[in-house]
Image (tube, rainbow, N blue to C red):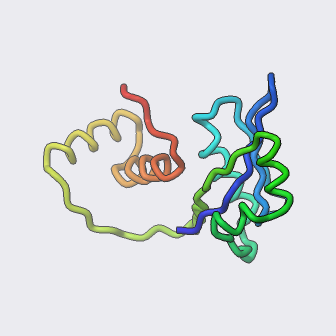
Amino acid sequence: MRYYIGVVHKDTDSAFGIHFPDVPGCFSAADEMDDLLSNASEALSLHLEGEPLPEARPLEAVREDEEVKKDLATGAFLLAVPLISLTGRTTKANITMDAGLLAAIDQIAKSRGLTRSAFLADLARREIEGKHASAA
């Protein structure tokens, strides 16, 4: 999986803002820190959809960027954000798990009007984006 390093800013009485030195023009924001990673990942996916992927420099290289150094000196911090490139194409996968867990998944998926596959795919995407489902 490819990760891009984002520069996060937070001023008093403002949302968290993030931009990507390696993806010019891509930015996102979130009122809560808990939403920042998923919002930033979605922004990357939408911004880069159908585009050639720019090089994703390693953390150390981004830290040495002069503009990033200025941002860090003013209180910004860095965040590694996963790029989840959805292809729109589905692929069949065979997985193995405890029968009781599978029954519970099927029950919850059905109660939400989802297929097992849609439910598991949504959970996986949320986990990767750092947006964990809250306990029901």
Where does residue 91 sit, x and y in percent of width and height? 42, 70
Give the residue furthest to the top: 13
Where does residue 21 sit, x and y in percent of width and height? 79, 61
Where does residue 124 sit, x and y in percent of width and height? 43, 52
Measured along the vertical axis of the image, is residue 49 above or below residue 114? Answer: below
Give the residue furthest to the front: 73
Where does residue 34 sit, x and y in percent of width and height? 58, 34
Q: Is residue 29 visible?
A: yes
Residue placed at 65% from the left, 30% from the top? 32
Measured along the vertical axis of the image, is residue 60 above or below residue 37? Answer: below
Front residue of 41/94: it is 41
When asked about the image quadrant of residue 44, the answer is bottom right
36 left or right of 98 in image:
right
Give the residue furthest to the left: 99
99 left or right of 77 in image:
left
Front residue of 48/61: it is 61
116 left or right of 86 in image:
left
